[in-house]
Image (cartoon, rainbow, N blue to C red):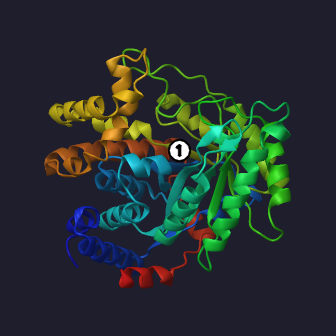
Amino acid sequence: MKNLDTLAYQAVFGSDSEKQAARFEIWQKGVETGIILSSINDLYLARGRGKLANTFTVPAMNLRGMAYDTARAVFQAANQLKVGAMICEIARSEMGYTAQSPQEYISVVTAAALREGWRGPLFIQGDHIQAKAAAMGQIKAGETEKLEKLIKEAIEAGFYNIDIDMSTLVDLDKPTEAQQQVPNYEHSIHFAKLIRQLEPSGITVSLGVEIGHVGGRNSTVADFTAFMAGFQKGLPKGLTGISKISVQTGTDHGGKVLADGTLADIDVDFSILKNITKAAQSQYQIGGTVQHGASTLPDKYFNQFVKFEALEVHLATGFQNMLLDHPAMPKSLVREMYQYIDQHHSDERKPKHTDEQFHYKLRKKALGPFKQRLWDLPAATRQTIRASFTDRFAFFFKELNVVNSQTIVKQFVKPVIVEKQLKDFSAS
């Protein structure tokens, strides 16, 4: 077998034939050594049915820039702390602006796990498989077909954890929660049915939905019960439903950036997580609540997710900030990225944006065009940055109480090798 660093690089930047060969070799080696793409569904339902206490919160980590090195840091920290209850994820929007397809992402994360000697079920998640709205309560033309195609591609690649996000369609112009949630649950049902049709034999995809759009109005128990009443009624009899529910507690993706580029303090209502988790478990036996937009919150907040019984927390922009603001990151490269933003995304600049606000909000869109430049940074630079990431992931694992969670993962998750992947790789 080729050197894993070389394989990972070829899986991303090689010719079409090199990519396919490298991706197959990575997948095959992963299976041989016990790294199996898996669904976390049974672990989450164990929480919902009272077989596991609400004493930990699963981190779901979005790996945007320098994904291979960042993923290596995840597994370095996980090895040190014996963490199994963790997810690597990427959102629909991130796949676009970071130029990472589902198959590429799977291969990079698997290669990183191999490189660090990590073993166990590997949970890869499609985050925010989100519909764009044409108007309040109305999905944009062509969105359904685009999302159907993406879901099919993701499941075929090995994304056995998917978060459907139709919260953008919640119609707040309607007077009652039941009416507001109609377009949300109707479209969620459509994609839930599709996912159950596409999931491989022996695997039940862990399926999440969202009732409160991040950055919008805070979620309530009434929102949740209204959504679930419609969702459960419309779901075909016998079809497996959801394992978790994403809610809004007052956060924003990336935080609220001030004129000088620093982040504003955020008022998070943690009680929302606990109240809706209680309703989710007692009424529907599902795992509980999911917190988005958390990575830029103050460090003192993270143990609160466990205290208030959140099932899962999503961490993204904070890692991007660590990378681009790291002392070891060449300042000349960051300047080039900002120049790219100025040249190609100036139409997205708001009238009152300062340069600092504009660059902070939009610099994520330079990650794709500069992907290879970031991968090609000197080995010593990448090692220094990777060490910082390892420490950061270790912090989250400890605060979220998933240290030594390999034991519970082994107890509740039984990995299934999907032979269809073998055929797909061989034919490509």
Q: Quadrant of residue 337?
A: top left
Residue lying at the far front of the rendered structure: 141
Q: Quadrant of residue 257?
A: top left
**Quadrant including the N terminus:** bottom left
- The one of 224 and 308 positioned closer to us in this rendering: 224
Locate residue 285 relative to residue 353 in the image: left or right.
right
**Residue at the image point whose x is 83% and y is 39% from the top:** 179
Is residue 217 positioned above or below 90 on the image? above
Is residue 386 positioned above or below 275 on the image? below
**Residue at the image point whose x is 71% and y is 32% from the top:** 271
Position in image of residue 202 (x %, y %):
62, 79
**Residue at the image point whose x is 39% and y is 20% from the top:** 262
Identify which amino acid the numbered label 1 is placed on: His
**Residue at the image point whose x is 45% and y is 42% from the top:** 316
Please count the marks in the image. 1
Is residue 356 positioned above or below 5 on the image? above
Residue 282 seen in render: no
Q: To which residue does mark 1 refer?
A: 314
- The one of 73 and 258 positioned closer to us in this rendering: 258
Position in image of residue 314 (x %, y %):
53, 44
Residue 321 seen in render: yes
Q: Residues within 10 Å of mark 1 (few under 14, many from 20)?
A: many
- The one of 402 and 333 positioned closer to us in this rendering: 333
Q: Secondary structure at mark 1?
A: strand
Locate residue 284 relative to residue 73 in the image: left or right.
right
